[in-house]
Image: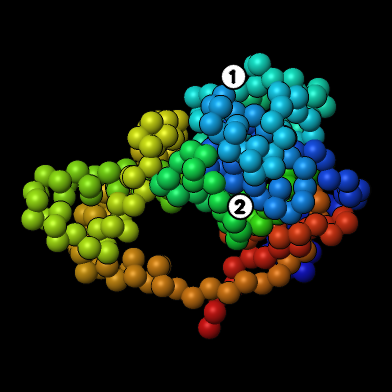
Amino acid sequence: MADAADDGAVAAPTFPVPAMPSPPVGVVGLGQLGGSLAAAFVAAGRPVAGWDVDPAARDAAAARGVRITRELSGVVVLAVPLPAMTTALDDLAVAPDATVTDLGSVKRPVMEDLGRLFGGRLVGGHPMCGTERSGHTAVDPGLFSGARWALCLEPDTELPRWLRVAELAMAAGAEVVPVTAAEHDDAVAAVSHVPHLLAAALAVTAGQAGPLALALAAGSFRDATRVIGSDPAFVSAMVQGNAGPTAAALARVQEQLGRPWADLVTEGHAVATRAQGRRTVRVPLERAALLALGRAGGAVTRRLAAFVEGWVPATVE
């Protein structure tokens, strides 16, 4: 990182990547995530095109100012369920030079499947936001504000296209985390996919405990089980699509539960309550340096000519 050479994150200098005009945006899938993204750009005065197989979702998006069309160009965002990723564009007219990105919660299988169709034009993505609600009635233009948005930077990813998608994510209010697909799937298994399974297990266990237990359930139970209110088909596709890393992360949780409970509670409390600040850094537009930022737990917040500016965690004394 440019102001943090002691972190070992600066790679060999590269030629600057010029700034590009904002491309058109097309969103396929106008449910909570896709509809919220389209609504965020409409609210910012940016033209957005969109399509959804559901007429009600199309009507709701049109009422918010989205231009409903089957013809898409610029940056085309796939905001559809994981099983529909490879077929979502079949009946649409997508410009041959369009950059394609997605909002899927699993990246390796999506990158493999879509990569065969779009090659270096594909930039895999996953905004870490959303709620247990779904569909076009759950649209929120502020959904991405302050969220981390993972963007895959693979060896064959075209950097100018990656930057276009990164700028789109930041324009929606998110902070961009450069990752590889494999790194993403390993990380979210621990912080997203296993929590969905744990929430399901807690809900089932409480249900088996009977009506009294459910009547006494309060804040801790509500918070611990909130995410399993999501669409079961969505959750199943997510955990099964990332089965290997999720099983490995779940095994680590089971190992932790075998420790003395007082030790586990103390260490868990320390992790959850540790104070961290942020240190601003500038990173050259180079794959290794960008990935080093993500691996350090940092994120990109804005583009600066031949650099991006962002932050990494800093310990608060």
Residue drawn 64% across the image and 29% down it: 51
Mark 1 residue type: Thr
Res 212 seen here: yes
Q: Residue at x 42, y 34 (%)?
A: 234
Instruction: Please tell me which of labels 2 and 1 falls first in the chain.
Output: 1
Q: CA distance from mark 2 to mark 1?
A: 27 Å
In the rendered image, the vertical position of residue 21 relative to residue 70, given as above or below = below
Q: Position of residue 81 (x, y in %)?
A: 51, 30
282 and 34: which is toward the camera: 34
Q: Measuring from the top left, give residue 42's x and y in whole percent.
A: 71, 48
Q: Number of callouts in the render?
A: 2
Q: Nearer the viewer, residue 163 or 55?
A: 55
Residue 299 vs residue 52, the one in the foreground: 52
How many neighbours does mark 1 have within 10 angstroms: few (below 14), some (14-19), or many (20 or more)? few
> Residue at point 83% right, 45% down?
22
* Picture layout, residue 7 above or below residue 232: below
Task: Give the quarter of the image for residue 154.
Answer: top right
Looking at the image, is mark 2 or mark 1 nearer the viewer?
Answer: 2
**Which residue is depicted at the point 21% across and 69% down?**
262
Q: Nearer the viewer, residue 7 or 60?
A: 60
Instruction: Confirm whether residue 128 shows in the render.
Output: no
Residue 211: x, y in percent? 9, 51
Q: Is residue 232 left or right of residue 192?
A: left
Residue 87 falls left or right of residue 189: right
Q: Quadrant of residue 118?
A: top right
| Label 2 sits on residue | 141
Taking 21 as reference, is 315 left or right?
A: left
Which of the labelled discs sits on residue 87, or is there none? 1
Which kind of residue does numbered mark 2 sit on?
Answer: Pro
x%, y% of residue 261? 20, 64
